[in-house]
Image (tube, rainbow, N blue to C red):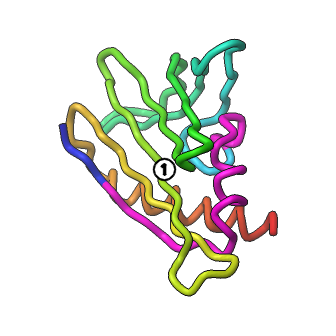
Amino acid sequence: MPSYTRSTTLDVDEDTAYAYLSDPENLPEYFPRITKVNPKSGGDEVETTAVIEPPGEEKQTVEGTAWFRADDDAHKVEWGSEGSSHYHGELDFDPAGGGGARSTVKLTIHSDSGHPGIEESIDETLQTIAQKLQQKS
């Protein structure tokens, strides 16, 4: 299963970054293709709506069920889906070197198949995360 990892340094502390990114309802704010998330009560299941553009095809709106888990002790967020498009991802948080109000977030995507442009998509997501958190601070 191919894995893709990128990281960036944020101008907010680890706790602030984790608090924002561990809320599944914030996903549409920083994942460019996700347009709606509806957490199901009593578990880690979420319903998602996204707009995708498969190579050689027109944009499509797709709906699905995924899981989203936030580990407060480890400051780690994980999500994924099963089935034909099985994938999962994770966000890890660490204090940035030098201390203070900075942190590093690492985004890793694991997928059953390669995806052209996935690295650029991850970079775009990390850039959006940094911008959103900067606006909130």
Residue 86 in the image: above or below residue 78: above
Q: Identity of the amino acid at label 1?
A: Leu
Say which of 135 and 61 sits in front: 135
Nearer to us in this view, 20 or 37: 20
**Could you tell me which residue is drawn at 53 percent across and 76 percent down?**
96
Between residue 5 and residue 124, name the one nearer to us: 5
The x and y percentages for residue 13 are: 68, 69
User: Which quadrant would residue 45 be assigned to in this image?
Assistant: top right
Which element carries disc 1, helix, strand or loop? strand
- Residue beneath the point at 48% across and 54% down: 92
The residue located at (49%, 28%) in the rendering is: 60
Relative placement, left or right, of 114 versus 69 is left
Residue 35: x and y, percent? 64, 35
Image-based side of 66 in relation to 20, left or right: left
x and y percent of residue 132 in the render?
71, 61
| Rendered image quadrant of residue 111 | top left
Q: What span is in magenta?
A: 5-28
Say if 81 sits above or below 123 in the image: above
Q: Quadrant of the N terminus?
A: top left
State the quadrant of the C terminus.
bottom right
State left or right for residue 51 relative to residue 86. Answer: right
Write down the residue under mark 1.
Answer: 91
Does 47 appear in magenta?
Answer: no
Q: At 43% across and 29% down in the image, what residue appears?
A: 80
Relative image position of residue 74 (x, y in whole percent) = 53, 47
Find residue 128 and report its image quarter: bottom right
Furthest toward the front, the residue is: 73
